[in-house]
Every structure is written in structure tokens, then in C-alpha cells.
Amino acid sequence: MSPRAPRGWTTSADIAARVRRRWDDGSLLTAYAAGAPCPRVEVPIRGPAVREIGAELAAVREWSARLVRDSGEGAAYGLTLREVGGRAIGRNTIPARAGVESFEQAWRLLGVGAQVARFDAVREVTASREPRLVGWVARNPLRALAVADEWPRLVAAVAWLAGNGGRGWYVRQITAAGVDTKFVAAHRGLIAALLDELLATDPAAPADHIDQSRSRGAGFAARYSFAEPEPLVHVRVDAGFAGLPPPVTEAAFRLDELARLRTSARRVVIVENQVTYLAVPVPAEGVVVWGAGFSAGRLGRVPWIRAAASVIYSGDIDTHGFAILSLLRAGVPHASSLLMDRDTLLAHRDRWGHEPSPTRARLDRLTDIEQVLYQELVEDVHGSAVRLEQERIAWDWVEQELTGLRWGWG
């Protein structure tokens, strides 16, 4: 009769699973990279009770022999044995504890020799090309190991970026060997982590070399003092505005160039939505500007907009719409709002939407009437996270409001 398979008795796979936890959390490789002793892992072995040995002696012997074979004579783990038995079955020696106390045992037991060799190559490249990252590799071994094939290029990219920020260059101008902007974009999060480490440990780096207000994602270039494309400001104009040729009725400018224009306008309309911006007539002696969300706040840096006799902002009726209006008034205190009132909101109840993440910020630059409506939106007086997007306002309602301004619309 063949021996039954043991149930619940510890196997070499169970021992490996306990050790693998130390691999998966990086602690084994971190200790290895730091030259520290291998973290010892002790595994109590669950085996047969004395009363089971007589009935399943063949299975017990096979189980015990397999644990011994799998240990590789101590190459994968050590075993502590104990004697069990008595008169009925005789004395038998079975495994009681397993122990892993060296890196060599751990690598053999887990079968990760090839991965450790790759990690060693990462450490060698780091030590020879950018020693200031040795500590990061030791603390983040699995992250480094995951990109072992790309590591030389990553180190080259990081070294170039660390040395060339603040020169007014774009990341596109990178000249590190084998590195281009697509490579940087593909590994942006990791490169950012390495740059933070490198610049934080560089005594020659300016204290403000990392702009912590910028993210490692969308704000990557600005975070490390590289130039980034500036959103253009779109403006619809009367013929001849700012010396433009008469056929030109719309233009887009960099903000700093828009601010340097030697021109003037009596009336400025700043509109949130692009299609509404295109549809609103250009007022006499004036311009229509596409505000494009929180970019509208930048328009206060344009002298001729600040100097305009009348500036109107028209945005969404939601909490962020009023936040943008308040931001605009930081630079243009006399700006007024249009189509951002309770009557407009309530007249379009069937067109309301839901604001995904309303703000509850204190807005000190709203008029009393605007402040009341803003608080109603914050407190969900009209419903939960009510939002009326500008493009949902009926066009005849828009035309009626524009006519009421008596601006001499063209």
C-alpha cells in the first residue's frame, strides 16, 4: 500500500514562501546591497504527531527525506532535527525547524540567482557612473531591478537632467547617450524620484532647484527648472487691433508677448468655453478672450487688460467658476461677471450637471451677490454639487444679456 500524501505538514515550498516575503518587500536585497548580515528566517516545521507515525510511517519517512533532499545539504536551508517515537515504532528522527541565515541560501531556495546577478549589474553601473544614487538603489532594490535593462540609460538621463536644469532649455534638448524625450516620458515617475534623490544630496545644487509645488507628472519639466510650452491665449479682435493686418480677426499669443503688446481696448470679454468664445460678438473697441479655465487668472498680468475701462468674465456657474472669477480679480479688481447669477442658474434647471469635486475655498474677491450664490452652491442649497456649464445656457438668454450691456456689439 503506497503511503498517503501528508496533509498540513510543512514542505520546502512552505519554507520558501516564508523567505519570499523578505524578497517581495525588498528587505533581503536592501540588506544585501548595504553589506549587512542576511536577515535570518526561522520556520517551525509542522510534521506528524507521534500517534500518526505508526499508522503513516512510510509517508512520514518520505516527507522527511524530501525536506532533507530539498535543503541541498544546507545549500538552500538548514534543518534542525528531533527524535520522536517509542517502543511501538522505534525512535525516528524528523525535521523540527528550518533556517535560512545566508544570502546564498536564500537565492538558492528562491531560485533568484539570475535576478540577483542583474541587481549586481545595476549596482555596478550606479557606483561607477553616479555614486550618489547608490543609497537609492539599496532602499528601492525591486524598483531598480524592474528596469535593470534600462538602468544605464536611466542613470545617463538623470545625470544630464540634474546638470542642465535652469538654463531655459526644453527636455527635448537632452543629449544623454541613447536617451530621447519619449524615453524620459515613459519613465518620468522613476526619473523624477532619482532626480529628487540626486539633487537633494548635491551640495552644489541651489536650494530651489526642485520646485516642490510642481508634480512629478504633468509638472515634470517645471519641477526641475526646464522650459515647458506655455498655453497660448486666444483673442478675437476688431480689424487692425495691435497693428495686425486688417483680415486678421483672431490670434493666439504667448502670455508674455500679449502683455508686451502696445495697444489698448476699452472693453474686454473673457469667456470660459471655447465655442462660446467663438460665438460671442466682438464688442466695439474691444476684444474677446478665451479664458480656458484657471488660465483666466493669468490675464491679470496683461497691462492693457488691467487698464480696460470694462472687463467682463463669463464662466460656469459652479464653485470653481467663482474661484476663477476671484482669481482674475486679483489682477483685475474691477472685472465684473456675466451670466453667473441666480436667475440664470434657476432658469436652466433642466440643464444642470454635477460638479465632480466642488471647492469650499474662501473667496474674498466676490461681490455680495456673487458670494451669496457661491455659498448656496457650496452648501448644496439648490441640490447636490449643482453645476451649470456655460455652453448649456440657452443662446437667446445669452443674447439678451449681451444686449442689456449696450456695448455696441459688432
Image (tube, rainbow, N blue to C red):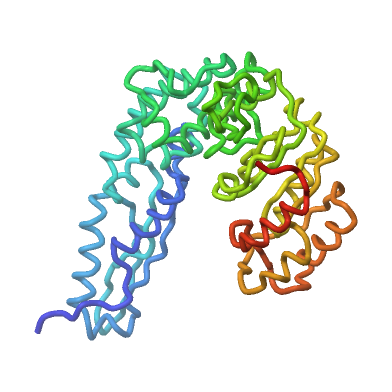
Q: Is residue 357 left or right of residue 104?
A: right
Between 49 and 210, the residue placed more toward the observer is 210
Q: Residue at x 30, y 32 (%)?
A: 149
Q: Nearer the viewer, residue 43 or 357?
A: 357
Vertical side of 350 occupied by 273: above or below: above
* Residue 159 in sight here: yes
| Left or right side of 2 for 245 | right
Q: Give the x, y percent position of residue 404.
A: 77, 54
201 to 320, vertically: above or below = above
At horizontal 49% and vertical 21% (from top left) the residue drawn is 170
In the image, farthest residue toward the right: 368
The quarter of the picture where the C terminus appears is top right
From the viewer's side, name the closer residue of 249 and 274: 249
Residue 229 position in % (x across, y down):
53, 28
The tally of labels here is 0
In this view of the protein, which residue sits in the foreground, 57 or 376? 376
Q: Point out residue 233 in the picture as x, y percentages from the top left corner.
A: 60, 33
At 58% across and 27% down in the image, what residue appears? Answer: 253
Q: Is residue 30 above or below residue 229?
A: below
Q: Quadrant of the N terminus?
A: bottom left
| Residue 361 point in image, percent of width and height | 79, 53
Q: Is residue 356 visible?
A: no
- Examine the rendered structure and indicate whether residue 358 appears above or below residue 305: below
